[in-house]
Image (tube, grey):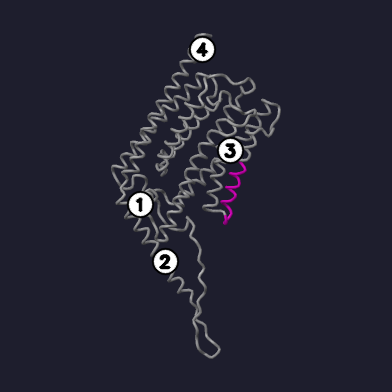
Amino acid sequence: MNIAAAVNENFANYSNYLIRSAMFVYALAFLAHLAEWVFGGRSRIAVQSAALVAEGAEGGDTGAADQKAQQVTVKTAGGGTVTLERPAVVTRASASDRGIADGPGAAGEDEQGDMYGRIAVSFTVLAWLLHAAGVVFRAASVQRAPWGNMYEFSTTFGAVAVGTYLLLLVLRKNVRWIGLFLTTSVLLDLGLATSVLYTNSEQLVPALHSYWLWIHVSCAIISGAIFYLAAVGTLLFLFRDHYEVAVTAGRASNGRWGDIMRRLPSAASLDKFAYRMNALVFPLWTFTIIAGAIWAQAAWGRYWGWDPKETWAFITWVAYACYLHARATAGWKGRKAAYLALIAFACFLFNYYGVNIFVSGKHSYAGV
């Protein structure tokens, strides 16, 4: 028993060392991504901005021609003619029909910026390998699934989020723009986990020793990681949408903020990315709640007891269901649907941090 305890303690120490090493490399990736944005060719991007403004002006001329095309010549009773003009209908263009192309990315067209971006991705891969190894050693130290408390859940959550981002890059998706925001949030997540949420390796209560721990909690972690990536896309959509409205109106900013906005994907692309991510993972979140109910029946003898965690998981499900339904409703596309998506993700965050820390219940994590 003493030898086994010593081995488990060594595994726990290795895990802590690997997690802290991953944080250091994530910090290097963050600095490299920051350099990518800073050194991205601002002068070359300005050319694209001018092209967008010109495109908007041409669109205005086309609109004037279309308006003239709506003029109708009608004969009067006295044999003469009179030209009537149909009233113009003014509508605001949605993000999907503005015809604005994606920005060139964080590096713009600058070779130095692109080099820093590639270095940042390389650091992110190395940090993720250290991060994932830390999670594996934590599992070895506790001899169970490594998400029995908030510390373990947080570290695994960050690893899955970064792993999903790297998978999208492998699939050649244009998502390198997420890198700066992802490394920032993962550093905050791991910093909070190691300094505030840390709990020594220990076993769960007997009622929770079940294979449903692997199924239910792993699905919750994957769902949360993808919801997070979608939330980043949604938030950036709101900023980019505001910028594109200014571009089409000829009020585009030439300052640093406008320079950053120009390099992001178009509002239509960001909106599509966020919607697809949310739609992709919503069935998994539904299964997470169902699996939790089955596990609750096995552990506590009831499928549903309106425990705070169960209640907020259901509230989160309803919020995302409303968002997906709103996307199919013409009046709730664009910004309104984006606000609803952010509210849904806020419900998810409160379900994790707020309920676990401030509300007691059967799902309360030990050692927090």
The answer to whether marks 2 and 3 mark residues whose Cβ atoms lie closer than 8 Å is no
Q: Which residue is mark 2?
A: 60
Camera-side residue: 120 or 290? 120
**Magenta-highlighted residues:** 317-331
82 to 215, vertically: above or below: below
Q: Which residue is mark 3?
A: 285
115 sits left or right of 130 in the view: left
Please tell me whether mark 1 or mark 4 is closer to you in this view: 1
Q: How far apart are the alpha carbons under marks 1 and 4?
A: 59 Å
Residue 332 disc label: none
The answer to whether marks 1 and 2 mark residues whose Cβ atoms lie closer than 8 Å is no
Q: Position of residue 102 (x, y in %)?
A: 40, 51
First of labels 1, 4 by sequence position = 4
Camera-side residue: 226 or 360? 360
Q: Which residue is mark 1?
A: 255
Q: Residue at x 38, y 61 (%)?
A: 55
Dot 4 lies on which element?
Answer: helix
In the image, is residue 231 part of the stretch drawn in magenta? no
Residue 5 disc label: 4
First of labels 1, 3 by sequence position = 1
Instruction: Name the amino acid, label 2.
Output: Gly
213 sits left or right of 298 in the view: left
Dot 1 lies on which element?
Answer: loop
Q: How far apart are the alpha carbons under marks 4 and 3?
A: 36 Å
Instruction: Name the amino acid, label 4.
Output: Ala
Instruction: Name the amino acid, label 1.
Output: Gly
Dot 2 lies on which element?
Answer: helix
